[in-house]
Amino acid sequence: TNVRATKKEYNIAPSKPIDIIIRSFDLEKLNLLDDNRKYLERFTFANTLEFINDNRQIDKCKTIILTNLEVFIPLSGVINIEEEIKNLTNEINKLTGEIKRCEGMLNNPNFVSKAPEAKINQERAKLQDYTNKLQITKARLEEMK
């Protein structure tokens, strides 16, 4: 499910084969996953599926953290990393501007005293939404670097 969600997040076709690395220090869990390799490969459209139990660094990948398990999806070769970094940076700048705009409105005593409560609540909701999106976008940018 997380692999399919990642493909959707990065606009990768669901049927496009990708490389997947699964790390766990629980050898029993790795053996269980390896015993079910053909199902994992089939449902994730894995090009390669590698199981590891060491601390090697996996660069430029999407990391999915599960209980006693990490799933890495290397993104180089699947998406244009530089283009994605550029798009994420632009999105961060846009979201930062929207956050400043919302904060400016909500910190303006004239706006708060004169605007209808519904409009104030709407701006607060926008601020929360932009803040959440900014955190997610920054995390994705870090994954790309």
Image (cartoon, rainbow, N blue to C red):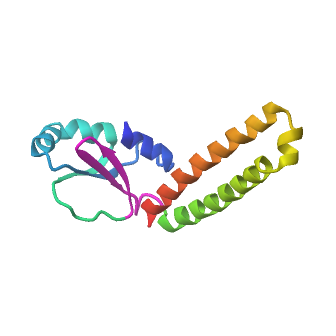
89 inside magenta stretch? no
The spot of residue 127 in percent (x, y) is 68, 45
Does 77 sit above or below residue 48? below
Q: What secondary structure characterizes most of the magenta part?
A: strand
Q: With 66 as the anchor, is 16 left or right in this view?
A: right
- Name the image quarter holding residue 87: bottom right
**What segment carries the magenta color?**
60-79
Left or right: 21 in relation to 143: left
Residue 143 appears at what percent x and percent y? 43, 60
Is residue 69 one of those drawn in magenta? Answer: yes
Residue at horizontal 53 percent and vertical 65 percent from the top: 85
Who's the residue at 20% across and 61% down the image? Answer: 55
Q: Residue at x 43, y 46 (%)?
A: 6
State which quarter of the image contains the C terminus. Answer: bottom left
Camera-side residue: 36 or 122?
A: 122
Instruction: State the image quarter where residue 111 is shown.
Output: top right
Is 33 displayed left or right of 85 in the figure?
left
The percent coordinates of residue 79 (x first, y second) are 46, 59
The answer to which of 129 and 106 lies nearer the viewer is 106
Q: Quadrant of the N terminus?
A: top left
In the figure, residue 3 lies in which quadrant? top left
Front residue of 82 and 26: 26
How many marks overall? 0
| Residue found 38% across the figure and 40% down from its top | 2
